Image: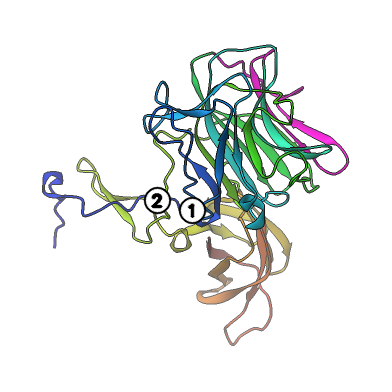
């Protein structure tokens, strides 16, 4: 029976399925929405952290990236604190993967460094600063023995213009730290040490704007759509900066169907899909002799570990090792008889497996003339 493309004018939305599949890992989400001059805002993450304004920090409708308002700092000692609940809920990002991201807009450069966000103490903590001498944004953290930097001495160190919105993101994936500006990587470095937090060392929790008793490093500008995600490096390569406000709800488990009336098929958008239902990697390869990949997704290479033994290496690492791999291989004259793969070792960068013979003419491992493997997980 022939399939006729649907008339797009006859379709209507039944509801929104767009959300953030990593929303449960979001530890802080500040859209800074509100009325002009307000001195309170809500954390829309599930942690509902306590947020306190100090100095002249306030919600402003003069500039915003999304939502019609942002947080304004006038450069004379303003700050916003995220209180002790940030620590008691286990949200600190001392170790493991994370993503910190927000939009900034500089009103005027002064003589002082600007502290956009920090967890600051004596030989502890981390921060995202901007440097008035070069107009760049940079990151530092203390790893227990030394201060480590991104985009400070090395890196692209792009000079930011006044009255312009910039998306800033810092991520950690494994031991690799990266800083992005408007989706383009400015710098990266490796540090396998844990960061050292400073709960209560100078102030309790996190701070945006001026720090310590002297209210040093004040910000003169605006901040919008701030988010911290713990356990997930959302960005590990160049990306398109968000074009809409960050989602404030978890992703819907239902798929979002997008109809393209000029094409012969249906495209399925990934926004809001339960990621556990999507293949995270797959590969079709010939493992006899020199391994040759026929086609793949999120697979950088196959390591030949011996007769019937292989390792699949991921292009982008998994966030954990709680994924599953399945597939079949065929070999020799019995290519119609499948082997079943048996994964032996799971790691975030890939997994090892063995091809087990399931026929009656032979027993043991055999090289794969034709193999297909699929990986599922969060």
Q: Which residue is mark 1?
A: 23
State the residue in front, 92 or 299: 92
Q: Residue at x 74, y 47 (%)?
A: 199
| Local SS, label 2 | loop
Q: Is residue 60 left or right of residue 110?
A: left
Residues tagged 2 and 1 counted as in contact (Cβ below 8 A): yes
Q: Is residue 36 left or right of residue 132?
A: left
Q: Which residue is mark 2?
A: 19
Other-residue count near label 2 (Cα within 10 Å), few / some / many at <14 / 14–19 / ≥20: some
Q: Residue at x 69, y 23 (%)?
A: 217
Q: Quadrant of the N terminus?
A: bottom left
Q: Residue at x 57, y 67 (%)?
A: 325
Q: How many marks?
A: 2
Vertical placement of 128 versus 312: above or below?
above
Question: Where does residue 136 sit, x and y in percent of width and height?
Answer: 65, 19
Residue 236 visible? The answer is no
Q: Is residue 163 left or right of residue 347?
A: left
- Please, which colouring scheme is shown? rainbow
Question: Where does residue 356 sit, x and y in percent of width and height?
Answer: 63, 77
Question: Where does residue 155 sit, x and y in percent of width and height?
Answer: 70, 24
| Local SS, label 1 | helix
Magenta stretch: give its range.
132-161
User: Magenta stretch containing residue 254, yes or no?
Assistant: no
Q: Residue at x 57, y 84 (%)?
A: 359
Other-residue count near label 1 (Cα within 10 Å), few / some / many at <14 / 14–19 / ≥20: some
Determine the main secondary structure of the stretch shown in magenta: loop
């Amino acid at each position: 029976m022939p399939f006729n493309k649907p008339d797009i004018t006859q379709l209507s939305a039944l509801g929104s399925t767009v959300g953030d599949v990593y929303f449960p890992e979001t530890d802080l989400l500040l859209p800074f929405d509100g009325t002009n001059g307000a001195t309170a805002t809500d954390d829309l993450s599930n942690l509902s952290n306590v947020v306190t304004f100090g100095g002249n920090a306030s919600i402003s409708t003069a500039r915003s990236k999304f939502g019609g308002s942002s947080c304004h700092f006038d450069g004379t000692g303003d700050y916003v604190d995220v209180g002790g609940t940030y620590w008691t809920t286990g949200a600190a990002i001392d170790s493991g993967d994370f993503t910190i991201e927000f939009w900034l807009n500089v009103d005027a450069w002064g003589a002082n460094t600007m502290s956009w966000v920090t967890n600051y103490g004596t030989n502890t903590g981390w921060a995202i600063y901007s440097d008035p001498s070069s107009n760049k944004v940079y990151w530092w953290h203390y790893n227990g023995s030394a201060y480590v930097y991104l985009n400070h001495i090395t890196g692209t160190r792009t000079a930011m213009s006044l009255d312009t919105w910039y998306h800033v993101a810092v991520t950690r994936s494994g031991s690799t730290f990266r800083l992005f500006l408007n989706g383009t990587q400015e710098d990266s470095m490796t540090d396998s040490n844990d960061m050292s937090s400073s709960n209560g060392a100078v102030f309790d929790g996190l701070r945006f704007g001026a720090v310590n008793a002297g209210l040093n490093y004040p910000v003169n500008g605006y901040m919008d759509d701030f988010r911290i995600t713990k356990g997930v490096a959302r960005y590990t390569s160049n990306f398109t900066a968000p074009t809409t406000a960050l989602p404030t709800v978890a992703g819907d488990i239902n798929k979002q169907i997008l109809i393209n009336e000029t094409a012969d098929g249906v495209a399925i958008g990934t926004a809001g899909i339960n990621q556990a239902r999507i293949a995270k990697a797959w590969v079709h390869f010939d493992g006899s002799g020199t391994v040759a990949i026929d086609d793949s997704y999120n697979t950088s290479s196959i390591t030949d570990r011996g007769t019937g033994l292989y390792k699949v290496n991921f292009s982008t690492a998994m966030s954990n090792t709680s994924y599953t791999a399945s597939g079949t291989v065929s070999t020799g004259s019995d290519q119609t008889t499948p082997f079943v793969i048996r994964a032996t070792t799971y790691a975030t960068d890939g997994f090892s497996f063995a091809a087990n013979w399931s026929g009656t003419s032979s027993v043991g491992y055999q090289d794969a003339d034709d193999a297909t493997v699929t990986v599922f997980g969060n």
